[in-house]
């Protein structure tokens, strides 16, 4: 009989070196989840279920989808994925506790993108913000007991499910959460009550700066509290470095705002430096934001061409400014 880890969805096995490894098949958790929960010991994984297969499987159901995206990842790429789905979609924007912005501005921004959904809602799982309204929205729109949670890695799907269980269920159940992308490895069904089953899915993989950082650097880059923007007025050509894994070279006269963890260190240089990072030359329109997954947002006020220094050839998306 196949048994799956209740924390991440991997098939449990006693074969060492395999995903889902456990010393005892009577256990409900694989060793990876056990170590994350009990020792904060994180382990990156290289194998995941094929995301196209996951999306197609969800698409072939008639069940509603709760598409979870954090406030830093709202973009036209999001619209493309949701448009591909046949299902009715509730768009759930997470991590509202991290940024000081009116939620109506976020909803209007979503509406202007013409994303195909039956409702949009801004939440904070950490602060319980709007969770009652979200729970009502789910129950009013579901067409069966099953509701799928789909979204990018590290947007907080598993954290949201855990909070819903805590708030609206008498079940003693927790999905594994961690600071690493791709903690959930397969479908995980959670029965909230006799009328509602939430189905967590592996995150849609985006190029992510976290994949190339060590654990101590990851702990710095993940924001834990409301972000205080770092604002720079650019009067001469210069390079602004963020720790040693990210930098931007920008011409005068402009304004640059960084939205990211306050544990990171910023340094200015007024001449070229040898940073051994990957260089991307990017043309940026007026009033735009660069989405750097795992880091946050860089907002640039005026049209320009920049050099962006990255720890690897990470995808960078440009969106019209939200913040």
Image (spheres, rainbow, N blue to C red):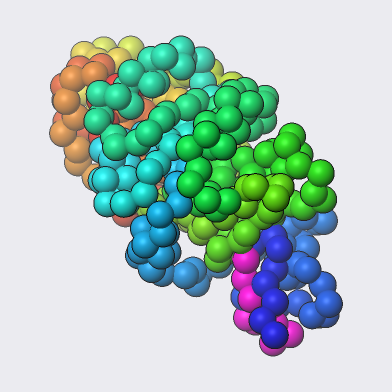
Q: Which residues are magenta?
A: 9-18
Viewer-nearest residue: 148 or 313: 148
Viewer-nearest residue: 316 or 103: 103
Queried whether the magenta region covers residue 239, the answer comes back as: no
Determine whether, in the image, residue 14 is placed left or right of residue 179: right
Q: Quadrant of residue 300?
A: top left
Queried whether the magenta region covers residue 13, the answer comes back as: yes
Determine whether, in the image, residue 52 is placed left or right of residue 182: left
Whole-percent x, y for residue 225 in the image: 63, 25
Residue at the (58%, 30%) spot, across then down: 136
Chief secondary structure of the magenta portion: loop
Determine whether, in the image, residue 87 is placed left or right of residue 96: left
Residue at the (19%, 38%) spot, across then down: 282
Whole-percent x, y for residue 310 in the image: 36, 46
Whole-percent x, y for residue 134 in the image: 56, 30
Determine whether, in the image, residue 83 is placed left or right of residue 8: left
Whole-percent x, y for residue 296 in the image: 44, 34
**Relative to 294, residue 232 above or below:** above
Q: Quadrant of residue 323?
A: top left
Q: Is residue 100 visible?
A: yes
Q: Quadrant of the N terminus?
A: bottom right
Q: Quadrant of residue 44?
A: bottom right
Residue at the (63%, 26%) spot, across then down: 132
**Relative to 100, residue 116 above or below:** below
Q: Is residue 223 visible?
A: no
């Amino acid at each position: 009989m196949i048994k799956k880890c209740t924390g991440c969805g991997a098939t449990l096995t006693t074969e060492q070196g395999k995903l889902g490894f456990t010393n005892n098949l009577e256990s409900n958790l694989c060793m990876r989840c056990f170590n994350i929960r009990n020792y904060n010991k994180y382990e990156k994984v290289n194998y995941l279920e094929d995301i196209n297969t996951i999306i197609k499987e969800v698409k072939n159901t008639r069940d509603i989808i709760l598409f979870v995206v954090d406030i830093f990842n709202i973009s036209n790429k999001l619209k493309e994925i949701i448009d591909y789905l046949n299902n009715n979609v509730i768009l759930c924007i997470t991590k509202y506790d991290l940024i000081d912005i009116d939620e109506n501005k976020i909803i209007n921004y979503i509406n202007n993108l013409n994303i195909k959904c039956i409702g949009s809602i801004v939440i904070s799982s950490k602060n319980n913000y709007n969770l009652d309204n979200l729970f009502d929205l789910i129950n009013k729109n579901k067409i069966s007991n099953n509701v799928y949670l789909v979204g990018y890695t590290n947007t907080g799907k598993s954290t949201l499910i855990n909070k819903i269980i805590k708030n609206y269920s008498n079940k003693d159940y927790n999905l594994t959460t961690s600071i690493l992308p791709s903690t959930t490895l397969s479908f995980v069904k959670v029965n909230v009550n006799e009328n509602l089953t939430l189905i967590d899915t592996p995150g849609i993989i985006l190029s992510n700066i976290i994949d190339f950082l060590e654990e101590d650097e990851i702990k710095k880059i993940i924001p834990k509290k409301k972000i205080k923007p770092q604002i720079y007025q650019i009067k001469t050509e210069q390079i602004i470095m963020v720790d040693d894994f990210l930098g931007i070279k920008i011409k005068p006269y402009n304004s640059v705002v960084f939205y990211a963890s306050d544990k990171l260190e910023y340094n200015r240089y007024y001449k070229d430096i040898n940073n051994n990072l990957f260089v991307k030359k990017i043309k940026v329109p007026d009033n735009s934001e660069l989405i750097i997954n795992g880091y946050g947002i860089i907002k640039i006020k005026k049209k320009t061409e920049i050099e962006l220094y990255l720890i690897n050839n990470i995808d960078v998306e440009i969106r019209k400014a939200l913040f």
